[in-house]
Amino acid sequence: MSLHDVIRAFEGLYDPAWAASWDAVGLVCGDPAQPVRRVLFAVDPVAEVADEAREWEADLVVTHHPLLLRGVTSVAATTPKGRLVHRLISTGTALYTAHTNADTAAPGVSDALAAAVGLPGPLTPLEPDPTDPAGRRGIGRVGSLPEPMPLREFAARAAAGLPRTAGGVRVSGDAERPVQRVAVSGGAGDSLLDRARAAGVDVFLTSDLRHHPASEFAEHGDIALIDTAHWASEWPWLSEGAARLVSALGGERANVETRVSEIVTDAWSLVL
């Protein structure tokens, strides 16, 4: 398989046209003609992931987060991003990003998050993509637990289903209140707080909740919040993305091996 072949199959699953207008998705570096036998999936394009790719002899790294989200005028090796580009090119490793197009896809990042925290289907988008006539794509997912359970129990289930990070999982609300209707959104989600209220959920699970929006939201007292580590909420999608890519390439006949990085690239390493 060439890099061109792999990207074409992957973009059939996560169309770059679905990405937000501000986003930067697609091929960051790499020759479309180069052969691809090993693909490493990771959340963040950082030095540790590049080291893992080199040690495993990956030909392509697919990350969820963009390396060059904002415009740059140089990729000199005097900056962390520049050094990473140099390292990837020197080892012949391509880098590809699927960000908000993977968020809005169906299935996408929030579907994998829902499964990880024990929220079964059927699921509907929290913020539907208006360009999807089927109404399946969009940011976040909403679903219902088979039976109501205490917030404490659902939060514990979520924490057990997600990879561990230093920050763990934070909960806002009465720990004993029953919850059944649940909204989830991988990555930063405090812009979706009003959407969660409009959806009539009992609890909203997302990441990067800032103090003031969360405090004002909690004052209403009607919806509980669960705040997870950003990296942890998006990591479950990697396995799904890898499996779907292999299937799109023809399964075992494709002769392409995938691997999900287990390196914890969450920004926080210690909580005291």
Image: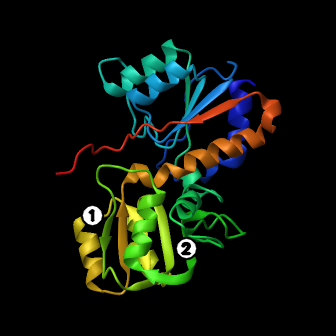
Percent position of residue 257, x then y? 68, 30
Q: Secondary structure at mark 2?
A: strand
At 34% from the left and 17% from the top, the residue drawn is 77
Q: Which mark is residue 210?
A: 1
The residue furthest top is 90
At 37% from the left and 27% from the top, the residue drawn is 81
Percent position of residue 143, x then y? 57, 75
Residue at image mark 2: 142
The answer to whether residue 201 shows anywhere in this view is no
At 38% from the left and 82% from the top, the residue drawn is 223
Determine the image quadrant of residue 108. Answer: bottom right
Q: Does residue 99 lie above or below 110 as drawn?
A: above
Q: Which mark is residue 150?
A: none
Q: Quadrant of the N terminus?
A: top right
Estimate how packed mark 1 is, as few (under 14), some (14 to 19) or many (20 or more) residues with alpha carbons within 10 Å.
Answer: few
Foreground residue among 106 and 133: 106
User: What coloring was used for the rendering?
Assistant: rainbow
Q: Secondary structure at mark 1?
A: loop
Q: Is residue 99 left or right of residue 124?
A: left
At 70% from the left and 19% from the top, the residue drawn is 35
Q: Is residue 143 left or right of residue 222?
A: right
Foreground residue among 264 and 153: 153
Three-letter amino acid code at the position of disc 2: Val
Percent position of residue 85, x then y? 44, 22
Three-letter amino acid code at the position of disc 1: Arg
Rounded to the nearest whole Å, what is the CA distance between mark 1 and mark 2? 22 Å
Foreground residue among 77 and 46: 46
Q: Does residue 135 lie above or below 167 as drawn?
A: below
Percent position of residue 213, x then y? 28, 71
* Upstream in sequence: badge 1 or badge 2: 2
Q: Is residue 208 left or right of residue 51?
A: left
The answer to whether residue 60 shows anywhere in this view is yes
